[in-house]
Image: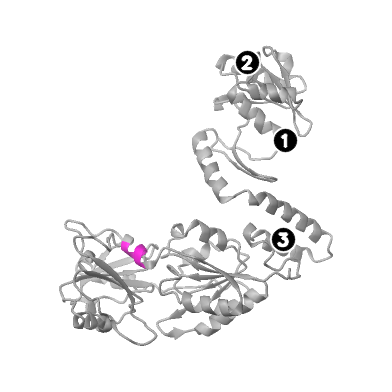
Amino acid sequence: MSLFPIFVKLDGRRCLVVGAGTVAEAKIESLLATAASIHVVAPKATAKVREWSREGRIEWNAREYVPEDLSGVFLVIAATGSPALHDKICAEARRSGVLCNAVDEPQRCDFYFPAVVRRGELQIAISTGGLSPALAQRLRKELEQQFGPEWEQWVAQLGRKREELLDIAMPSEQRKRLLHQYASLDPEVRYRNHVGGVATGMPGKVYLVGAGPGDPELLTRKAWRVLQSVGVVLHDDLVSEEILRVLPPTAVLLNVGKRCGARKISQAEVNEQMVSLARAGKVVARLKSGDPLLFGRAGEEMEALRQAGIEFEVIPGVTAALGAAGAARISLTDRRHASRVVFVTAHRSNGSGLTNERHVAEDTTYVIYMPGNRYAELAAELEAAGIGAHIPCVVISRATTRDETIYRTTVGKLPKCPAAVAPSLLVVGYVAGAPAGEETREGELSSELCPEIVSLAMQHPFHNSYGRGSVE
């Protein structure tokens, strides 16, 4: 069945509802949201239907249905609970050219009532073609959480802004671009971006957003919502292609990545860009792989924003350690093997190594961020720090993405590990050992079973072709 979704104007049109029980009441209430002329035919009615009749909002005839009730009717809703009566009503409606809906009888319906999210003039309708009204209702509840009451006022503001722009002489393409830019904002962002070519005078705002390990479905709901509304995105190299694809086409994307010391742009320059864009009234997302508060230089960036007097907000993300552990099916705190977890980065500003750690022990799970490919050095540092060569470890590359690879080995054999594509992460400890009897699954590559396949998979280049436009 192929349904054609339309929104119909019912202003002044005669709509008939046969039945006035609780089911019919819900249909009548949905019609009351329009300017339709509502007529109800039923011997008995609920208290609410009787109240609407007394208030003059509907016309209720307390009697049985007769075919003449269809005269001058645009659509009829049969909600009596009687299949025989519904069959009669629908047959007579078709002969009269009247659209008919029989509640809970999709085979008799000319149209269906979708599950609707209403926020003023904003209406989001969901239909399953009558196959699963329960699913449509569930989706409606989810959308009601996503589109809160603030959207009613926001849509009204958009309507006023559209009228203003239509009265201004400008090229149609420029007007279209401005309308799309304004509509891409989140209601909470309000007037922070430039609208109509004139700055509103309000300062911008910076969001420090955690992109998670790579799978867009691991973005938090708040991160997803904010990313749909920002004007500029300053993203790291390590943010996955899949995440970048969910950003709106109106957003300007600027790659400010720094990998293994090969810096395209300094941290001071990143800070300066955030501040200057916010001062220009832009809403900016500083998008970081994983969680911005864990080896994401968020401390330096928050300090720069504080000193500049720029409003900012931190939106945490699923940190790479948890994404990688989930991908490798590792419990970082498995009490049979570990009593503590240490997160450490292999790249530190002071140049110190793992041998300086004071908490190295065999009952510790070590999660080493940004290990690069210097596995021989790391293995030597681990052994020098007291971690035995027999201790299991695992290298997880591009966790939770379609290019994810997992390489299990031991500290002693770590130097033989193939080069991993960034972002990668190294987990060291007894928890990293493969569970007894568990077979390697697709995408989870064993160092002993298939090193050639690992090497081949690691040759995939990382492409970033998301530089869209420039900041105006």
Q: Residue 34 got which mark? A: 1
Characterize the local packing of mark 1: few (<14), some (14-19) or many (20 or more) Cα atoms within 10 angstroms: some
Secondary-structure class at tag 1 = loop
User: Would you say residue 4 sits in the magenta stretch?
Assistant: no
Location of residue 414 by image quarter = bottom left
Where 71 sits versus 172, above or below? above
Whether residue 204 sits left or right of residue 396 in the image: it is right
Residue 265 visible here: no
Q: Which residue is mark 3?
A: 179
Q: Of callouts 3 and 1, which one flags the residue occurring earlier in the amino acid sequence?
A: 1
The residue lying toward the viewer, choosing from 388 and 311, is 311
Task: Give the CA separation, mark 3 to mark 1.
Answer: 28 Å
Secondary structure, magenta segment, majority class: helix
Whether residue 200 sits left or right of residue 88 in the image: it is right
Q: Which residue is mark 2?
A: 88
Location of residue 52 by image quarter = top right
Residue at 41 percent of width and 65 percent of height: 213
